Amino acid sequence: METQLFAPYTLGKIELANRIAMAPLTRCRAIHQNTPNDWMVEYYAQRASAGLIITEGTSPSPNGLGYKNIPGMFNQAHVDTWGKVCEAVHQKEGKIFLQMMHTGRTSHSNNLPEGAEVVGASPVALEGQISTYDLGRQPYPIPRPMTTEEVQSCVQEFVESAVKCVEAGFDGVEIHSAHGYLPNQFISPHSNQRSDQYGGSNEKRCRFVLEVAQQMLDLIGKERVGIRISPFSYGDGETDLDTIAQTYSYLCKELDKMGIVYIHLSNMGEMTEHRRKLWDDIRQIYTGTLILCGDYTKETAIEALDKNQGDMIAFGRDYIGNPDLVERLKHNYPLTERNRETWYTDNEVGYTDYSFYEV
Ligand SMILES: Cc1cc2nc3c(=O)[nH]c(=O)nc-3n(C[C@H](O)[C@H](O)[C@H](O)COP(=O)(O)O)c2cc1C
């Protein structure tokens, strides 16, 4: 059977050159005021042969800029500079969605601009440490819980940012509801201990992200909004397995009713039996495009498509060192070795200097 991996695919109203996505990758190169620059234009343009590029996590709000040098999408400079990225990718016939990431409690005040604060669903700190601009590594702080009105304003920040994405020329937006960032902090009963309409039952814990999604869809169109989730990742804390499965089944059912253009499933670590089962259940529950990510190789990607486990496969780490990943996979050219040392630095080394394979 001919593999579909390299065949064109229709996502909503756009035509993708293949079923390979570049997974969102935070690279910390927005070194001046969290604003994209020429390095970023070049980096994304180099990777335009991916069927779909999903950008690095980008904040819709000053409060969501919890990591060093990550980009934002909430002012005119962001629109203008992200616009250059979109233009460069489109010139090469690529397609690009912005990943909208609010760090919430995964943050530190030293990383935030003046006036911004570390906020979350509830005053529960994440375990571990975060790298800061001036203070080295610091424990994660206890976030200030948002009032109900602030939660609603935060929904508006996501929605307004999505409108800016369309203005900049993005083909769409991916809501980052995975890996323990703000929407995931609302979904998980571990980090969400609220007693208003945004906490408690599965329905209430999912309300924040569902409001974000519905309002975005209403404003920019359902073909332009996707979402990333990572059931059973560290974002779910100590939650019991049944609760996680029930919560995400409910969420995906609602997203299906809404007609969101894709769900992007992220797995980190071992693909355990209960994860596999939930992914298979989600495949049944949700009828739109399903993107799968986490440790795929060419062979396992082809196998997953053949078994109809998903519609597209996203590659993360291999996209860092292989701008021409599609060609390399297609022709079985060797892949560049991964080098973690340069993943999050603040210069061009290990960013725009990876070469295309020469035959
Ligand atoms: C350097 C680096 C940065 C990442 N940044 C993000 C991010 O901004 N948003 C996100 O959803 N996932 C992020 N991830 C996770 C990747 O999107 C992907 O899920 C992970 O690398 C697993 O896919 P892979 O096995 O193909 O690398 C990041 C991963 C790495 C290695």
Image (cartoon, rainbow, N blue to C red):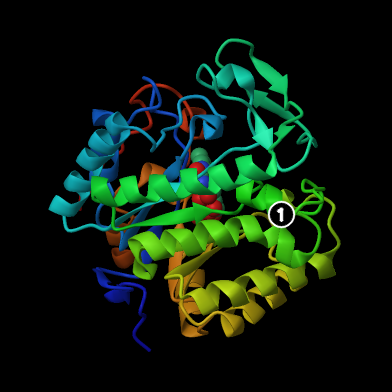
Q: 94 or 335, which is in the foreground? A: 94
Vertical order, 70 against 210 (above or below) = above
Residue sitting at 51 percent across and 16 percent down?
114
| Relative to 216, 13 lies left or right | left
Residue 108 visible in this rendered orientation of the protein: yes
Residue found 44% across the figure and 56% down from its top: 174
The residue furthest bottom is: 1
Could you say where residue 63 lies in the image, as x and y percent from the top left? 55, 31
Residue 200 figure quarter: bottom right
Task: Determine whether, in the image, residue 79 is placed left or right of residue 198.
Answer: left
Q: Residue furthest left?
A: 91
Neighbourhood count class around disc 1 (C-alpha, 10 Å): few under 14, some 14–19, many 20 upward: many
Residue 158 locus on image (x, y percent): 47, 47
Can you say which quadrant of the picture contains the N terminus?
bottom left
Name which residue lies at 77% across and 40% down.
122
Residue 92 placed where, x, y %? 15, 53
- In this view, 156 is above or below 309: above
Query: Would you place residue 279 above or below residue 358 in this image?
Result: below
In the displayed image of the protein, which residue is found farthest to the top? Answer: 134
Tell me if 212 is positioned left or right of 216 in this view.
Answer: right
The foreground one among 50 and 182 is: 182
Residue wearing tag 1: 198
Give the percent coordinates (x, y) of residue 19: 36, 70
Numbered disc 1: secondary structure: loop
Q: Nearer the viewer, residue 303 or 24?
A: 24
Quarter holding residue 85: top left
Q: Report which quarter residue 110 is drawn in.
A: top right
